[in-house]
Image (tube, coloured by chain):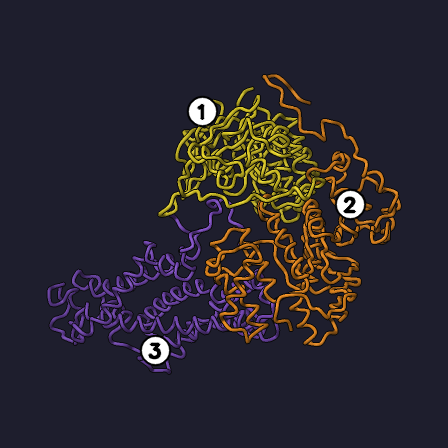
Chain colours: A purple, B yellow, C orange
Amino acid sequence: MSSPKGAPPAQPEGPDSPPPRFRAVRSIWTNRRSRVGLGIIVFFLLIAILGPLLLPIPRSNPSHAYRPPSLSHILGTDGQGEDIFAEIAYGAGFILQLSFIAAVVATTIGTVVGITSGYFAGYGGKLLTTGTDIAVTIPGLILVIVVGSFVKATDPLVIGLLLGIVGWAPFSRSIRSQIIVLRKEPFIETAQMMSLSSRRIIFVELMPNVMAFIAVNFVFIFEIALFASVGLYYLGVLPYNHLNWGTMMNQAFQEGSYLTASGLPSLIAPLAAVSLLALGLILLSTGLEETFNPRLRRG
Amino acid sequence: MESLLEIRDLGVSYFLGRSVLTAVNGIDLDVHKGEILAVVGESGSGKSTMAHAIMRATRPPGRVTGGSIRFHGSDLLKLSSGEFRKIKWEKIAILSQASQNAFSPTMRIRSHFRETMAVHGIRDKKLVEEVSRRYLRQVSLEPERVLNSYPHELSGGMKQRTAIALTLVLDPELLILDEPTSALDVVTQKMTLELVKRVHEETDVTVLFITHDMPLVADFAHRIVVMYAGRVVEIGETRDILEGSRHPYSHALIKAVPTLHGDSSKVASIAGNPPDLTREIRGCRFRVRCPYAQRLCEEEYPPLIEVSQGHLSACHFARTLDLPS
Amino acid sequence: METTMGAEENRAEDVPVIELSGIGVTHHVKGSSGRRTLEALRHLDLEIAPRELIVVVGESGSGKTTLGRVIAGLQKPTRGTMKFMGVDLSKASREEFLRYRRAVQMVHQDPYTSLNPALTIEDSLTAGMKRWDPWMKKDDLVRRAGELLVLVGLSEERHLQKYPHQLSGGQRQRVAIARALSISPELLVLDEPVSMIDASLRIDILDVLIEIKRKFGTGFLFITHDVALARYLCEKAGGGRTAVLYRGSLMELGETHGVIEAPANPYMMALISSSPGSRTGSSAWSTKLANSPEDDVEGCRFYQRCIYAQAVCAAKEPPLSEVAPGHLSACHFNGALVQSTTTATTAPASLSGPPSPAPSGPGATKT
């Protein structure tokens, strides 16, 4: 950070200017990108919550296979005669829970390890750093496949936990870099000169300055978990789950029905759902980034 | 005296959501050919904003709201970007605090010179080499050593000098120096100024020097323009301003900086705070901080009054004011 | 442990607050031409008395910032010993070290990074107080914070709830000073505290420091490259010493008035002549000063850029010796050069005065 050159003349903002944290929340609203992104995510949340309340669980009904979109089946039916929209709705809750848990787990572990290894330069820090480096090199995909094969779980929380444990390391490294840079800032030096406790420095002085970074990364990990899980379910690596976007795509491919017009919705629907949700997440994280880093703003 | 640059009624404002900050509020300024003109003002006076406007570097939320900047007769603000690009660097070059850090860390200095000249159509390697060496020597640097080096291998002072050489390489008519020495120590500062002075003597380049430090330009500039709150408050020859200022602000500004041999007891800071540029101010903008303010100052904005040949002051009482030395 | 702001009454007046003996700081830098050793500070001896104002001047690279950081405890010296109140810090007990930690605080150069952007001014000011006086009640803390703001010239209570980005650079520096004072230090190290502030706003901050010294007897180590500021500060404060550093070595040390009006060391003479408003002919130093110093030289560090340099200067490094009582200089020609700069040299008019007006009309050429 250096003195703002080329910025508007140094006129202090009014006394009513809100602190950085609240500015961030308010900015999510004003930034068009993040507003749209948030809207998309809320949309899926609503579908996930209201869907199972309003729609019956899709049941196999081969006689109704590949029906085109109609009033009773908004998106039509798939190869098993199940309502595609209902499948999407029930699958949404699953995937959202899973990705959320993964993001929480990865962010939490990553933050704790990253901040500790970044701030404490001694043996403890070095140990954690080395541990992180090792964790990064472990091929996550293989690990998930292996663990997934004997943890026959269909609970999204378990899968989410698994993905989170596999994916915390890269985030830990980037938070560590941030902390290392922040550690050298004069205001941290001053805190050390005043003999403030490490706990105080980490939680009160450092954390608020990396909250933005953590938030953006949380959304990012959420997105990665989303793609990873859909992909893994599509590949059939994770234990079979009936109401799942990935498995929907898998079935559509297996039956080869997507080559026909009537069969297309069964593939397009889950694909579009994943893409749309991912778009929402990307927009939200871009918007967050722009908020926290004013230099990225494009007016 | 021919004017190289004629600024008329220039206005630049920053549009910050609900409020509008008027950084430059109707400036008239002539830069004479071949002179060294210093624009002195504190932060918020509008001096840097004005420099950016001349280089068409005003970025949102800033915007030029009016006026003209004539260079050789044509209004720079009205040229197309292509036409302006031809003028930029070739005719008008700018050196700022950022110039020192504008070097690409992965390119040798030689490549920097090549690139700068290539942008303006000079690609002949021999010619580029010859010109680079000439200018590096002019700034007292050893061409051999510098051209082969990477930016991080040069000391701060050497980088500063190299940056100056780069701005001169296309033989500009006007050199704008935007607080180039603010972050530098006193020895490098002096060296930079002497360098520019020498180049000026050798090539007759016109120099516009922007700074907040009045004593710095005492031995350097021909004329001084003092800015306050987006307007010009005094113009005159250096000696006239430094020794016989006829504006309370310029006078206070000079008194506020301690000098090497001056009387320390006479040093006094300027009372009050700079005005809020988001608000319309009636009358003279300095009046709330001025010890000589009268009713008239609140009612009417003081025009630039000619105190003597070439010496103007925007104060109602410019001619009659008794300012202690 | 002090609970009120103020100097300790029962402090032994003759024990220096900080005593540096043979302090050296060497950095190992990896350049493109292999590893180099950079000596930021060479053999340095310095004593800072209680309540003293001492100014450290020098160009960039002189080691003045490193010196400040060593004294403030942010940089460990690679050689030499540092004593705080007579206690050798390398051998100090934890308690003694903590005493030192509290007693020496620092104000950084850049007001835009010295305050935590995520904390309110009140939080920044009370952080140290909470740590050192943990039994202070919240009301007292806030009141103390308010008092500190008044002390540094920010009289409005509402500043307490503001965030750093809502204050100007000068205001932020004042807060940084207030924060350093919040735990009643004995010595405040200020590293070019006003160099990033407009020239016209600097003396306000300096006046605040002078007032603090007067009221509380706090000592100051003021680092700057601006000799005029050093002079103003010491004059207004009623006295102070100046230490002149060049490339890690102490070149001159003495009462500020004497060092500026009658410098004994050529480097100080060069610094003064480079300062705006100097009476000495600048041309005398310009060409020589433009030379780049060589890295490893046997003799005087200033040899390549000194106008008085002789053979002996290249061969042997001059020791620091007394030119007058309390006035030290490291130059082989100590005393012999004193006279030549007090008489204002009349340099050719074209170089010491403002340039003559540009010739009007086309075709006027200059060689």
Q: CA distance from mark 2 to mark 3?
A: 72 Å
Residue at the location (55% across, 58% down)?
C150
Few, some or many residues within 10 Å of mark 1 (<14, 14–19, 20+): few
- Residue that mark 3 sits on: A157
In front of the other: label 2 or label 3?
A: 2
Residues packed near mark 2 inside 10 Å, few (<14), some (14 to 19) or many (20 plus): many
Chain of the residue where label 2 is placed in the rendered structure: C
Tag nearer the camera, 3 or 1: 1
> Is the residue at mark 2 from the same chain as the one at mark 1?
no
Residue B71 percent location from the top left of the image = 49, 26
**Mark 3 element type:** helix
Disc 2: which residue? C267
Q: Nearer the viewer, residue C277 or A63?
A: C277
Q: Which residue is mark 1?
A: B74
Element assignment for label 2: helix
* Outermost residue, front side: B295
Three-letter amino acid code at the position of disc 1: Ser
